[in-house]
Image (spheres, helix red, strand yellow):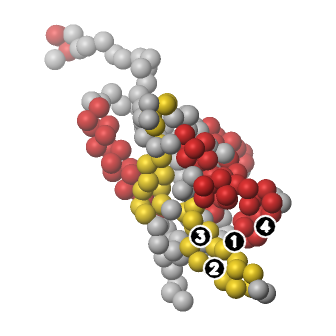
Amino acid sequence: MPIDPPVPDYDLEETVELTTAEQVRAISDPLRTTILGLLHERAATVTELASAVKRPKSTVAHHVNVLAGAGLLRVVRTRRVRAIDERYYGRTARMFFVGLGRSANGVPLPPDFNDFEVAAKESVAAYDAGQLRSFIRHARIPEERAAEFWGRVDQVIHEFDQLPRSGDTVYGFTVGLYPMLDYPTLPPRSDDEG
């Protein structure tokens, strides 16, 4: 086996846009996003997932079925164990995104969860231990520059998703770009500053 096997250990699409309310509801549950996160590393059975998240197998099976029904998970392989086919589930895409301002057949999609809210809760222990690396910056730039910048950030996100899984610590990585309509702005320069 290679030292750095590909992540995950099955084939999947790079990105999939979520276009139905069912898909957005499926991905908006914290346990289901944890399951999707675990499947970034490798395919897993319901039993393995239940063990990882310390929840009953029946609960995890329900959430796996919701994700599979929404087209976010699929069976990537099976293994015969004592006359039973054990199913290994994997994601259908490395990255899912909700189309902004979109609707499905004229029906507005439910809102996606706020990644920053999730990251704030996850990062409390790291902050308390002095191990949180973060920063926030603001820049007044045109929308085209923001889109260009986000394109470069998107490349880093994909790079992070494909890192070989090793070590003992899981790291969270949160990025965002958002307009701030009420942020203060300096007045234009006066002619004598020129």
Per the image, the residue denoted by label 3 is: 75
Depth order, front residue of 141/48? 48
The percent position of residue 176, horizontal first and vertical second, equals 46, 41
Per the image, the residue denoted by label 2 is: 78
The amino acid beneath tag 4 is: Ser
The outermost residue toward the bottom is 1
The amino acid beneath tag 1 is: Thr
The amino acid beneath tag 2 is: Thr
Q: Are marks 4 and 3 in contact (CB under 8 Å)?
A: no
Q: Residue at x 64, y 73 (%)?
A: 88
Mark in front: 4 vs 2: 2
Depth order, front residue of 67/40? 67
For marks 2 and 1 on the same chain, the one whose residue lies earlier in the sequence: 1
Per the image, the residue denoted by label 4 is: 51
Q: Quadrant of residue 74?
A: bottom right
Badge 2 density bin: few <14, some 14–19, many ≥20, Cα 10 Å: few
- Callout 1: helix, strand or loop? loop
Q: Are marks 4 and 2 in contact (CB under 8 Å)?
A: no
Q: Which mark is residue 45?
A: 1
For marks 4 and 1 on the same chain, the one whose residue lies earlier in the sequence: 1
Q: Quadrant of residue 71?
A: bottom right
Work out which quarter of the rendered image holds the C terminus and state it.
Answer: top left
The CA span between labels 3 and 2 is 7 Å
Q: Are marks 3 and 2 in contact (CB under 8 Å)?
A: yes
The CA span between labels 4 and 3 is 19 Å
- Callout 3: helix, strand or loop? strand
The percent position of residue 180, horizontal first and vertical second, equals 43, 24
- Callout 2: helix, strand or loop? strand
Mark in front: 2 vs 1: 2
Work out which quarter of the rendered image holds the N terminus and state it.
Answer: bottom right
Q: Which mark is residue 193?
A: none
